Image: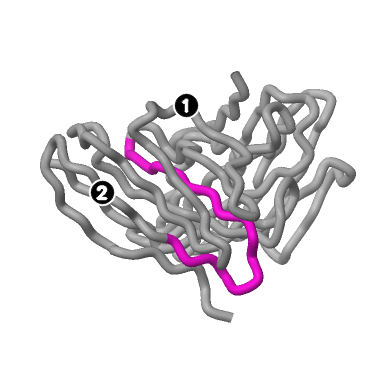
Amino acid sequence: GENVEQHPSTLSVQEGDSAVIKCTYSDSASNYFPWYKQELGKRPQLIIDIRSNVGEKKDQRIAVTLNKTAKHFSLHITETQPEDSAVYFCAARTLIQGGKLIFGQGTELSVKP
Amino acid sequence: KAGVTQTPRYLIKTRGQQVTLSCSPISGHRSVSWYQQTPGQGLQFLFEYFSETQRNKGNFPGRFSGRQFSNSRSEMNVSTLELGDSALYLCASSLGIITDTQYFGPGTRLTVL
């Protein structure tokens, strides 16, 4: 069935370094790719999303890139800060069976001061 | 606008019982999706409703069911609870479907003893 794989499952960086999280998806017709940040005990919050007609999108220290040919997309966080520590989820909207949102398994990012 | 709300926030049940969870979407949003979140399985899609119709269903047994009312509020029901149903149940609302952003509620933490 439809699948989204996310790597790594855990990531530890020093404050100020960059962090990269990668996801691959199986449905080549997927056209919407959001990223969510979930802090401990809180709800997932959308931080950035990209649609299939765009290759890259930036919002301050956060950027997402999409490679439709390879069916993968990545989240890039620059100049990381301790408050970036959280679990990050990627997702892809699959057009198979009506367009449900399939999530990756999550990446626990730890930013050490 | 008020965000997505879910009631109750916490629930403790015993095996064999049934439970009903409620989700109120952001005003004007017509789509509600439900997810089960567990440490080992991440965010698993349960179902999606739009204008009172179930559009999509995930790979969960028939014990999991849901519905949406004319005011877009949604409920999900789990019958004959099992220990493995212990999880955080999240709902998310969006204006429409396919590429519209989903906004999550705080979740209902269900513990089955």
Mark 2 belongs to chain: B
Q: What colour-coding does the image apply?
A: one colour
Q: How far across and down, in percent of the image, does residue B36 sit?
A: 40, 42
For the C terminus of chain B, give its image quadrant: top left
Region in magenta = B23-39
Mark 1 belongs to chain: B
Q: Earlier in the sequence, mark 1 or mark 2?
A: 2
For the N terminus of chain B, give its image quadrant: bottom right
Instruction: Name the side, left or right, on which B29 lies relative to A88.
Output: right
Name the one closer to the observer, B52 or A104: B52
Contact between labelled residues 2 and 1, with CB atoms less than 8 Å apart: no
At label 1, which amino acid type do we have? Asn
Foreground mark, 1 or 2? 2
Q: Report which residue position mark 1 lands on.
A: B59
Q: Residue at x 32, y 56 (%)?
A: B108
Q: Report which residue position mark 2 lands on.
A: B19
For label 2, the SS is: strand
Q: Residues within 10 Å of mark 2 (few under 14, many from 20)?
A: some
At label 2, which amino acid type do we have? Val
Q: Residue at x 85, y 43 (%)?
A: A55
For label 1, the SS is: loop
